[in-house]
Amino acid sequence: MLEKQFSGAFPETNVRPNPIGGRVQPPAVRQTRALFSGTAAKKRQFGCDAHAAGRGASLWAAFLIVRASWVHIAVAWGAALAVAVGIQADGWSAEPKGEAAVDGPIVGGTAEFNARSLPPNRQSYLKLADEIESHFRKNIVEYWFPRVVDRRYGGFRSHVLADGTIGPNNDKTLVYQSRMTWVAAQIALRDPPRADEFRNYARHGIKLLREVLADRDHGGLFWGLDPSGKFKPEWRDEKHAYGIAFAIYAASAAYAATGDADALQLAKDTFRWFDRHAHDAEHGGYFEALSRRGEVLLHAPPGRQRDLLGTPYGYKSMNSHIHLLEAVTALYEVWPDPLVEKRLGELLEVVRDKVAVEPGCLNLYFTPAWRPVPEHDSFGHDVETAYLLIEAAGALGRKNDPATHRMARMLVDHALEYGWDARHGGFYDRGFAFGPAYALEKIWWTQAEGLNALLLMHRVHGGQTNSYWEAFLHQWDFIVRYQTDAEHGEWFESVSHDGKPKPGQAKATIWKAAYHNGRALMNTAAMLRQLAGNEQTQARPH
């Protein structure tokens, strides 16, 4: 029983284990360890292979492309198919495809925003870094921990109601548990005064992944179990690339934060098992849906059409591959194994050159041979992928790779052109490659990824244009004014195009964790401080 396994197993936060020396810290962590110490783009005349690509996906794709250039050139396209087929991951909603366009999307019009007209200088960077760090402490660190720590069944509770009280649902899914473990590890790395406390939270998450969700008989990790550790009919015993990617991501971060050998071993074992069973040696990338024994599921089981992520069985997806890129980047930073390096380079090229396409979209679904299946464009995945590409390229020693940076910028520019609300701020959920957005709701994770990608574009291209900086200010203003729950804390899952939240939205579900907004806030605060330091250095006489 999970209850027996974890009862009394979680160390109290006032018990401070001795710091572990010699921990491997990824470059991003080394640059941001002291985190808590203190726009419209021009039209691009290109074609697009898919009918449409989601706005949120476009932003994410741009992020991923830049990240991939750091580690190996990865490929950023696959988000465009998710909404039409009902994918539920990363905030996709089972609700109607979009709210009525009351006054239509404000795309290409004159922005009415002028409240945050801070110039891009050292003073502004430091002011905003302080503000974002304060927001992070209040709405992420203090909101989630120790509130969701599950001392009875292990891991983290996955249901928090609108007012912040714990809800009755407590399923243990691989995606949610991994994301919360990753967040805890990152706080441990970046907040020295609370490092011991958050190392304990990260270890608590790894314990559930290793002892409960890991399949001791056949390898790999299960998609999810009920609180007592039993299979649920809707998930059965299947395994999926998307969940496994997040397990690798979490275990890699936990090792970087704690130095614990069992965390690194979990990351290694999970990668090896998945690569052995799911790698597509002929076409590149990975098959996604797997049986308990690791057989590739190319055909839907009786009574089902889509896999655990919502992808049609037998197809590859953008969503799984951008997160595999993210996970293998993190793994390579703590374990530079030759096979990991090879797979990272392959994933970078798959995402950048197959998933992502001009004019800056991500296709959502693909045949095994990477022929795209037409679908919508997800703006959140687009901007997220821009960041992940650059991150991956940097990890591979390709920090200034032209092809990666070109695609990352294209993904962000396309999202700004077609998915950006110039009147209110914020990115719409999804739309088409060459037309205005049709799903005008603003999802929390899309706004987080947009914030991160916009500042990243300013860091890279701010010497040429202030448009990304201005959009970043507008985006932050929208998040503070409308996406944040000022009364109860954290962010609303979804608000209307003009910032009205839907009533009764849960703050935590198996799909809504502290991962997207937590990472965006940590990254942007760190980037702002880096920008302030760079400007100060440049201003010194030589």
Image (cartoon, grey):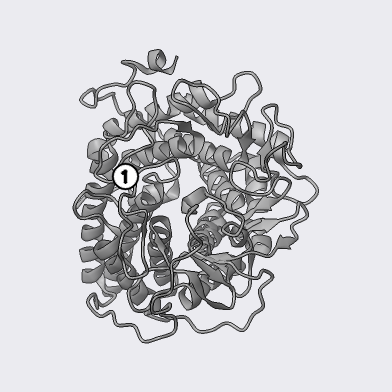
Q: Please, what secondary structure does the residue beneath circle 1 have?
A: helix
Residue at image x 69%, y 70%? 49
**Image quadrant in which the N terminus is located:** top left
Which kind of residue does numbered mark 1 sit on? Arg
Q: Where is residue 411 in the image (x, y as percent from the top left)?
A: 54, 69
Instruction: Please give left or right for residue 394 compared with residue 318 in the image.
Output: left
Which residue: 39% across, 62% down? 447
Q: In which quarter of the image is residue 104?
A: bottom left
Among all residues in the image, which is located at the extreme right? Answer: 282
- Image location (x, y in percent) of residue 26: 44, 45
Q: Nearer the viewer, residue 291 or 248?
A: 291
On the rendered image, what quadrant is the C terminus found in? bottom left
Q: Is residue 386 above or below residue 490?
A: below
Residue 433, compared with residue 442, is above or below; it is below
Nearer to us in this view, 331 or 159:
159
- The residue wearing badge 1 is 190
